[in-house]
Amino acid sequence: MSSMSGHPNELAAYRNSPAEIARTRDLLAIVPKNLSSVLDVGARDGHFSRLLTEHFESVTALDLTMPQLDFDRVRPVQGDVTKLQFPDDNFDVAFCAEVLEHVPALQKACSEIERVARHAVMIGVPFSLIAMAVRSTQPRVLAVPLWEANEPTDFPVFRGEVD
């Protein structure tokens, strides 16, 4: 969210915009179901962390600075996506939305995210008009929904189960 200064009123307006509501709905629609743990990379204010508690027993909310969160079943953690301090396959799912476009060491970040995910990796990048799902070369699934951040797109949005 490079256009967001982080001011709470601006962030609230952004989160309540029709495009952001649709993007959030689309991301949550393809979250793998019936698994227990998820890592929310770039948790910031815990927006997605809180929503992910509807699908997972435990959510670990990671950000560069310690997330100031107090949600049931959400554990805030300070960390760097390029040097994750978790064992291999520690989480059922790794979820990363609106983060990787800000990370200079993109390949390292992606490798680390995949390393800690046991079943699936979900990555959302908000600056493309293309919507698709991509299967990882590893046994895990790499679901990559891409969308236009500021306006609706004529491209279809991926909706459905990713196996």
Image (spheres, helix red, strand yellow):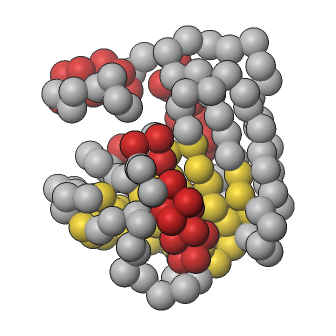
Name which residue lies at 64% across and 78% down: 118
Would residue 99 be found to the left or right of residue 148 on screen? Answer: left
Name which residue lies at 37% across and 80% down: 85
Name which residue lies at 58% across and 76% down: 115
State the quadrant of the C terminus: bottom right
The picture quadrant where one finds residue 84 is bottom left
Q: Position of residue 113 (x, y in %)?
A: 53, 67
Q: Position of residue 137 (x, y in %)?
A: 80, 67
Q: Can the viewer see residue 94?
A: no
Would residue 52 be found to the left or right of residue 85 on screen? Answer: right
In this rendering, the count of numbered labels is 0
Would residue 153 be found to the left or right of residue 159 on screen? Answer: left
Name which residue lies at 35% across and 29% down: 2
Q: Is residue 72 above or below residue 162?
A: below
Of residue 15 and residue 118, the one placed in the foreground of this image is: 118
State the quadrant of the N terminus: top left
Q: Position of residue 119 (x, y in %)?
A: 69, 73
Q: Position of residue 91 (x, y in %)?
A: 54, 76
Q: Can the viewer see residue 156?
A: yes
Would residue 2 be found to the left or right of residue 142 on screen? Answer: left
Q: Is residue 53 above or below residue 88?
A: above
Of residue 138 and residue 58, the one placed in the foreground of this image is: 138
Q: Is residue 13 above or below residue 101?
A: above
